[in-house]
Image: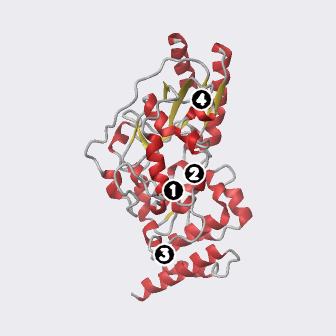
Amino acid sequence: MNDFKHQLITRAQEEGFVMTRVCRPDTVGAFPTHLKSFLASGYHGEMDWMERRIEWRSDPRKMWSDVRSIVMLAENYTPSFDPLNRLGWRDRGVISVYAQNQDYHQIIKKKLKRLAHWIISQAGGEVKIFVDTAPIPEKVLGQAAGLGWQGKHTNLVSRFLGNWIFLGSIFSTLHLETDEPEIDHCGSCQACLNICPTNAFPEPYQLDARRCISYLTIEHKGPVPEELRPLIGNRIYGCDDCLAVCPWNKFAEQAHESGYLARPELKAPQLAYLAKLTDSDFRRLFSSSPIKRIGRNRFIRNVLYAIGNSGRPKLSDVARELASDVNYVVADAAKWAVKRLSFEHQN
């Protein structure tokens, strides 16, 4: 199978994957214990889906007993700009780098399907493909396969790619040659922990999602706790702070996949424009984007928090127009924005 693995790596590179490694399905180490501790602490917030199929998350073989090898693939989406620079553009919204164009799930899924078909045609067996949606520990498997290690910010970090990485996996019934797992190279660095605006890391390698801006702007459905709203700044979908400061990014190459390159209208959109989006406007603007999943109301809520943090009194009128919105979460955010801008203007 050694020759076949070399062919597989070459074929994966042709599809755009920059790293391809293989591990066994039983190499999750202490992850089941860490997962139970994470859930017991309530760090998952409203993400109740993490509690379901916990046995699958703890052991990939429980999800598919026939799996013998797991091919882990990495694709980089490194931006050509520093995302932190746009946090100072207070009348504009900041969208996480991964969501400034097409939904990566769809892009990678198509590549994995082609690669999976190639594997079957060349070596037989059965396969299943996954892209960040099934209950499997992708980052843990990524480390077991040697793609990188889970950094102190809990994201996968590679010595060769930095931490702007998308992961995909192919489960196979074939016995493929495995790779050595990667070890931790974070050392004494705490850049990712120190920059977090909301102190979402209780300890290194632990994330309290309930304080994470990515969670609050994407997964959290209701009003964000008022004490956290000012800390969100102008981030309207996700947060890249901990990723952006990782020193290992100096080895990263910019993304080549066109679907990951920022659309001009999403690089730094005007808050005033976004706040006026109707539901149909929202769905049209984000038709191929992962942002579409959270819906217009949650997105406008985020925009209104950014308006409240903008320090631009002229945006009060924009927020005031939404204070009577039929959605109570939007109305609450609008009233908060008006009040905050009024208070700052008086002072």
Amino acid of disc 3: Glu
- x and y, in percent, of residue 337 in the image: 53, 78
For the residues labelled 3 and 4, the Cα–Cα distance comes to 42 Å
Task: Give the secondary structure at mark 4.
Answer: strand
Residue under numbered circle 4: 170
- x and y, in percent, of residue 278 in the image: 71, 68
Residue under numbered circle 1: 44
Q: Earlier in the sequence, mark 2 or mark 1?
A: 1
> Which residue is drawn at the image coordinates 58% and 39% (left, top)?
56
Q: Residues within 10 Å of mark 3 (few under 14, many from 20)?
A: few
Amino acid of disc 2: Glu
Q: Earlier in the sequence, mark 3 or mark 4?
A: 4
For the residues labelled 3 and 1, the Cα–Cα distance comes to 19 Å
Of tags 2 and 1, the one toward the viewer is 2
Residue under numbered circle 2: 51
Of tags 3 and 1, the one toward the viewer is 1
> Which residue is drawn at the image coordinates 62% and 65% (left, top)?
298
Amino acid of disc 1: His
For the residues labelled 2 and 1, the Cα–Cα distance comes to 9 Å
